[in-house]
Amino acid sequence: MLRSIGSNKKWLFIGSASVVIAGMVWLINVASKDRGPLVDFSTEVKPILNKNCISCHGGVTAKGGFSVLFEEEAFSNTESGKPAIVKGDPDASEMIRRLTSDDPEYRMPYDHEPLSKEEIAILRRWIKQGAKWGDHWAYLPVKKPDQQKTIDEYIKEKLDEQGLRGSARADAATLLRRVSLDLIGLYPEQDQIEKFLQSGGDKKAYEELVDSLLASPRFGERWASMWLDLARYADTKGYESDGHRNAWPYRDWVIRAFNKDLPYDQFIVEQMAGDLLPGATDDQYLATTFHRNSMTNDEGGTDNEEFRIAAVMDRVNTSWEGIMSTTFSCVQCHSHPYDPFKHDEYYKFLAYFNNTRDEDVPNEYPLLRQLTPEMEKELKYVMSWIEEGKKRNETAKGPGAAAGAEDGNWVRSLVKFYQPAVNSTTADDLVNAVIGNMNYALIFKNNSSARFRNIDLNGASQMIWNFFCNTPGGRITLRLDSANGPIIVRAPLAAKDEWRYEAIKFPKQQGVHDIYIQFETPTLPSQTDKFSIVFNWLSFVPAFPGEGRPGYKTAYDKYWSLLTTSVPGVPIMFENPANLHRKTYVFDRGNRLTPGAEVQPAIPAALVKNMGMKQEEMPSNRLELAKWMTDPRHPLVSRTMVNRLWEQLFGNGLVETLEDMGTQGALPTHRELLDALSWKFMHEYKWSVKKMLKEIVMSDTYQQESRALPGHLEKDAANKYYARGPRLRLSAEQIRDQHLQISGALSTKMYGPGVMPWQPDGIWLSPYNGSRWQMSEGEDQYRRAVYTYWKRSSPYPSMMNFDGAQRVVCNARRIRTNTPLQALVTLNDSVYVDLARHFAERMIKYGGVDASQSGGLDASKSGGPDAIVLTAGGGESGPVDHLIKWGYRQMVFRDITNEKLKAMTELYARAYKEFQAAPESALELLGRRKDSEHKKMKSPASNQGLAHEAAMMIVANALLNLDEVLVKN
Amino acid sequence: MTRDELNAGRLAEEARNAYLQLKTRRHFLKESAMGLGALAMGTLLGGCGQSAIDKLARHAANNSFDPLQNFDPAHPLLPKAPPFAARAKSVIYLHMAGAPSQLELFDYKPELMKMDGQDCPPSLLAGKQFAFITGVPKMLGPQASFQQRGQSGAWISDHLPHFANMADEVCFLKAVTTDQFNHAPAQLLMHTGSARLGRPSMGSWVTYGLGTENQNLPGFVVLTSGGSFPDAGKSVWGSGFLPSVYQGVQCRSEGDPVLFIKDPHGMSRDLRKASIEAINQANAAAYEEYQDPETLSRISQYEMAYRMQITAPDVMNINDEPAYIHEMYGTQPGKSCFANNALLARKLVEKGVRYVQLFDWGWDAHGDHAGNSLNLGIINKYRSVDKAMTALLLDLKQRGLLDETLVIWGGEFGRTPMMENRNGVQNPYKGRDHHTDAFTIWMAGGGVKKGFSYGETDEIGYHPISGKVEPFDIQATILHQLGFDHEKFTYPFQGRPFRLTDISGRVIHEILA
Amino acid sequence: MLDFFGRFHPVLVHLPIGFLLLAVLFQWMGKMASMAYLRLSVPVILVLGMISALFACVTGLALSGTAEYPESTLGWHQWMGILTTLLSLGMFWAVQRKLPLYINGFGVLILAGITVTGHLGGTLTHGENYLFGEADAGPALPPIADIQAAHAYNDLVQPIFEARCVSCHGATKQKGKLRLDDPVHILKGGEDGPAIKVGDPDGSELIRRILLPANAKKHMPPVGEAQLLPHEIQFLQWWVRSGADFRQPVNALPQTSADKQMLSLVESASQGLAGDAAPGNNGGTAPVFPLTAFIPNKEVKPADPATVQRLKAAGVVVLPVSRESNYLSVNFVTAGDRLEDSTLHLLQGIREQLIWLKIDEMQISETGFPLLGQLTALTRLQLSRTNLSDKTLSELLSLKNLQWLNLVGSPVTAASLVQLEKLPELKQLFLYQANISTADWDALQKALARVQIDTGNYRLPLLPGDTSLVK
């Protein structure tokens, strides 16, 4: 019996045993392998390394001789003598051992949370698979896409992956509003609106609309407000007293540039180095204000050099963050921990910017003086007179003869820029003299002496200088190379109670010398604390050419009055002449007081390599640098701009972090699309921003409805796969401009100095600065936001509430928020209350007929003023509905739904009742002077009129606060 | 997961709950209750346990202060719990812009008196850079008489007769040092952790980290006096690279207490209420159309705006305070002065405002004119703050608020033991130049020691000899008292996590109770 | 999916343990003729053991993918588990082949396997030394009356060493050839060189070891031994920095103000006072009550989210006291001017977690106060400017944990306030603008001797300087 059981149970056992064996085999197999899909370095591994390792094992700080910053470092031997990563063998790799040890002394990351199981698994797999390194995508040149695909095709691919479906095309009204606000930040001309709406918004009409918008002068204004954040444009200097800066001509340059669709590469070149372009035009000089928008500090006692360097660094950082989506600023203190940029490479790059004339002086030299047309004509005359003389001279004495002597180019330069010149603040070797407050001017007492170093005296025979001296009997002496060196000239100095220009003539000099300026006067005690001379700037130039020639006096006088007439000037970039050339040093930990090795201009090696540049292609000056940036091989510039344009239209960049495409930035949602567009931008569209924008807004993706369909929010709340159209709160500028337009108050006047629309008192209170917010007159109150005066230390409050940028440094991205303070602006800010008043007036004036028939802003179908009385009586009567319907249509081009209409008419009724009971508060609301209306107030009819107007104003105020109006659909 | 995605995800979650309420609500505005806003926010932070965000929160607590769960564009100001148990709920920072002289107030230096009028020894000038002193200045003895006060025996000069009685309530830091000798950069360093413009101010960091407890008031309020903004302008309460919603909200004693808080002239409160209800009804309809969660948060923001209109002017109005309180502070109703601001500060903290920043301008004691000389104009500055700041401490104390409110008083740097000789010329009045190496600030309440003094300077108050602290240390300490680890409290910007204390900072445990 | 299976690992592991132990057990018991029948069941049990072991392994593998475990321990656990399963297979084979030697061999190995694997598993889930918990560190120092007068070495250093080190580094045992029981040996040091570097704590091996993370290999005292208390470490650091003197009293050695501070802490600690949380004189002249002192040490479970929701919807600010804690603080600052009973009922839902409550300028109904009285976890309560009256005050006497009570501006009189003595924990009481006069003061003082009372009403004299300017 036992046996029989045994025999069949035997099979049972053997069966189960084999199951177990099989199981174990599989198990051991699994347990001992790092199986899994192929690991991608730049998207999976690099992020882990950057997050956890690189701060201690990156470039400079390679603890234990191990660094994961560059490929060669990662696999080379560490201090232990062995490499930390053994390709193909995770278990033999010290790295993995360290990551997985449980001895805190040994385990990495040292003294931090251990890596997650998943992260370690990825690293194991990566090493197992041979530890392939890869360059970060954004630092590799844009490649030509293999096959031509449309935006929509790229988008669809991802949508399919996500199991999402795109939305239908939005209706005409939505499209009209969306594309207009996006392209020109306003609504188009009335006839265009009519035309488009009547067409029902079909593709053809849409394209026509787009073209007309791109052609509109409003286009430049809208896109300028984007660029000015990057250019940190402002109308003041920034620090402490935060004084006025005459920079608005640059703002206008940007607007014009966008309007004439200046190719983006040229756009960049002119702003980076317009001054260095051969035969640079005034406009090209103006463009360079881009880099003079950096802040300056006039505070007493500040060190000009400190803030000059701060400005130069700001220029470097802005160039990278704004134009190349790279956070270069970290590198000023240490090698970039995440991206392949070395510490000294920051200063090599800085060297390109380190030789401009600006020195943080209060007068902001060098300037492009804004000569009036007449003055330009005069200058022309002077220059041609000189030119003519030069020719004559050559024909007389043979070509080029004594050209030096007759060369009058300095005249033009001096008149236009006050250059060549040295700022008196740079004087040293002072005797009985000081630099006022350490930073604003050289000041003499008596028996004073000061030195100006390395003055180029070749051909010079006069010193033209700007100064103040009201001490009589003084005598000024210029000496060469030492305080008692040979005297160039000694001249009496008259006393005058004004700042003045003078020319002190002396025999022609040669060579580059130190110049000692000395002064003494018998009218002051030899040792005194009294100030005798305050210097501004000094210029050493040749004699005015053509002395003795007929017409000399006329020419000379014209030239002198041009030089001495005071006109505003715009800060510009202007390169140092050879004699004033600055050396550039590496700053240890970014501290200028601990300079390291001297460096020459160069761009980071990693990019040289990736772009496959030859050494001779290395830029040697700012202009070549600009050319390099716009080289089609440059991996970042086109990507950055395309990404930014996309963000402006969709609310999110294809790379969310506009400021950083580097390895720490967000990963692109649609990398192929970004590259394809970037390629097109450069090669097909030849850097035309308008063409690029057109392609995007013409895509179906852009034209989708923004309604969130079931599943959208769950699957893709952020809409980063674009299964629906963008729905975003408008920018600070868009809101102001749109509301101006809806209420009919908008002034389309372009250009000119910043304007000051209404602002509450007490916003401006800078120390040592008397300037006040002077509310602009007339239409200037109703200019577009881009023209609003921008004071850095106290920016226009309502714009700041809507996430405007303070513009102290380059601001690559605004983050949209939603706060009660925003509601308070559009509800209560006098500006918006005033606009509600205008809007109400329009509704009353033009809305008096059924809005559903009216096309919109058209005055012809107006019900006329008498509509007031007509509608006043009833309060909620039909006509009021018409007004509201009409008004609503002005805002969003569609008919108001009954629910909304009901909300508004009820509000009207309530307000009407209240104001009828209290006409004086109606008057107050309408901002009318009581006495003038006094008589009228007797008559009930006019009270009704008043109540009606006031009630409509309340409604207008509400309408202008509707979600649909504050966002674009 | 990017910030936007997370927030969008959160918005979606929010939308579902909030919408149910929306459907069932008849009236949008309940004056006494938070209304839809709160309902919408219900699903958000500050709660305990559950949601995905809270997981993140816990994760954040032991990794770093994770912006993913700390910044929500829809409700960026929601109240949030501090990562660690806090010792202070609110901060009142009294900044004397222009830098008061430690040598006339707290740092008693009899030795310096002996040197009065002598030429400054070259050893003190070697390698030093001053803002204005040029050549060899004269030493200047203390322009004040000192006494030891209270049990703690702290030296406080007769310039502060009222404050002298507070010696046992406060904690002095006597060896504070900075590396910026100009006002604007030094003030920026003090409040933003960087001498350059562009970084967020301490208050905006705190608001970003804790939101605002009283949804009807801003979480970070700034009050200025002295006739001018601090030299560094609004950047000392700006939000830098943080979302601008975290910038300080300036409250004024003239004009609107908060900008745009007042209804248009001629519009009644009821009418405003009606209009906001109308707007929100219309917006609710818009939500039905577009299903955009953002619309819901806009609805709640308008409700909040309305409640703010009711609450803020009340809190900002000091006129209802009893007469003896006005006497205690020495207020001048209707004016914008330090005393009024001090009283406002107490009212705000009482109502749950987290961070109140006072700037009083005009302390720059150069002595180049009577108005800023140590024994004329500056004495009036002492008088303008002495009573008010003393009253503030006592008033907080009697309301049981002092223990949970950290009060800080100080300038951006100190003054030199030498008399200023601007441009090499002896200044006409007694004055001192900017001095970076050593100055005094005091703290009170908020879990710091009472009647304690930390740090010492040499016999002329020129250099620290012990207990030297930097602005970063003060910032680290303030954050610590509010429940943050300053090394983990970061915001990702330009590809790296930024900290208020940048790469330095040490919590001054020695002064903590 | 994976992690779903993973979750079963902790349950499943116990099957193979049971089965296999049983198998071995039966196998050996079966040796006795009287129990030979047990052997019949051994193969079946083994098979069950094997299969359950197999599942245990699979689920274990799944689990390992889902959570963070120390890699090496995990590795060992995994392979030991697999090995044990294989052993059971081996034993099964041996049983089939009837090879007594092997059977017993495998039996032993299986027992070993199970024990090791089990222990490793335990370590993974419950952490290191879940077997032998940490020895509790009592104070090393006897009470010290005046630390400045005390002898630095004899009265402080030596007692600390005695309590923390000498058991391994003394006359009897000299681990690492180090003795810390007398100056000579201390200075001599051990096999890793001198233990202390005079004047340089960070450079001293002794200090360095103490400061290493607790679970570092070289950390001293070793895991499981009594650890040094923070102030003991601080003292040793100072002692080394100040020159590791063996002769002088404390006050003879250099001290910065920070050191003085630290020393007074050591003193109060030795007397069993102070410590960060507890209020008391920490060098300053007056006691300070940091908020952290009002958070109970013992943990509490999370509050019911639904309740929290409803409270928030009512405009109540509900916040954890910190993100690490489940304790809640509640503030009614945005909840209007009437405190509805309904809301107070809601509060009952979080009464275990609710420790801080702020009610300012609100009207509470007669029936409301009893509800407040039920919030017994409260440590801080503010009832300022409410309608709290003598009549309703008694309702609060049930708040046994209350330490901080703010009744500013509430119409209560001394007569009823004296009852507050019934609150055992009460430390601070704020009565500014309450209904009391100076006459009541003594009575209050007597009744509430332990309590720090602040009746406010401070005034500042008007001085000439307040109202005049110098010109």
Image (cartoon, rainbow, N blue to C red):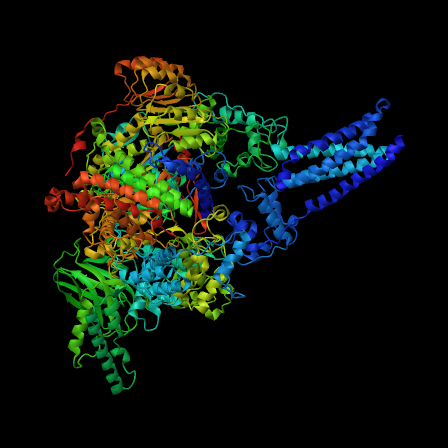
Place of residue C273 in the rendered image (x, y in percent of width and height, measured from the top left): 45, 22
Place of residue B461 in the rendered image (x, y in percent of width and height, measured from the top left): 31, 39
Residue drawn at 41 percent across, 19 percent down: C399
Q: Is residue C290 above or below residue A361?
A: above
Place of residue A18 in the rendered image (x, y in percent of width and height, measured from the top left): 79, 42
Location of the C terminus of chain C by quadrant is top left
Q: For residue C127, which quarter of the picture?
A: top right
Q: Is residue B81 above or below residue A725?
A: above
Place of residue C72 in the rendered image (x, y in percent of width and height, measured from the top left): 64, 41
Q: Is residue A944 above or below residue B145?
A: below
Q: In front: A642, or A555?
A: A642
Would you say residue A705 is visible in this rendering?
yes
Location of the N terminus of chain C by quadrant is top right
Q: Is residue A26 above or below residue A625?
A: above
Q: For residue A688, which quarter of the picture?
A: bottom left
Left or right for A198, reference A147: left
Left or right for C112, reference B230: right
Q: In front: C86, or A305?
A: C86
Would you say residue B181 is visible in this rendering?
no
Q: How many marks?
A: 0
Q: In front: A148, or A780?
A: A148
Q: In front: C347, or B290?
A: B290
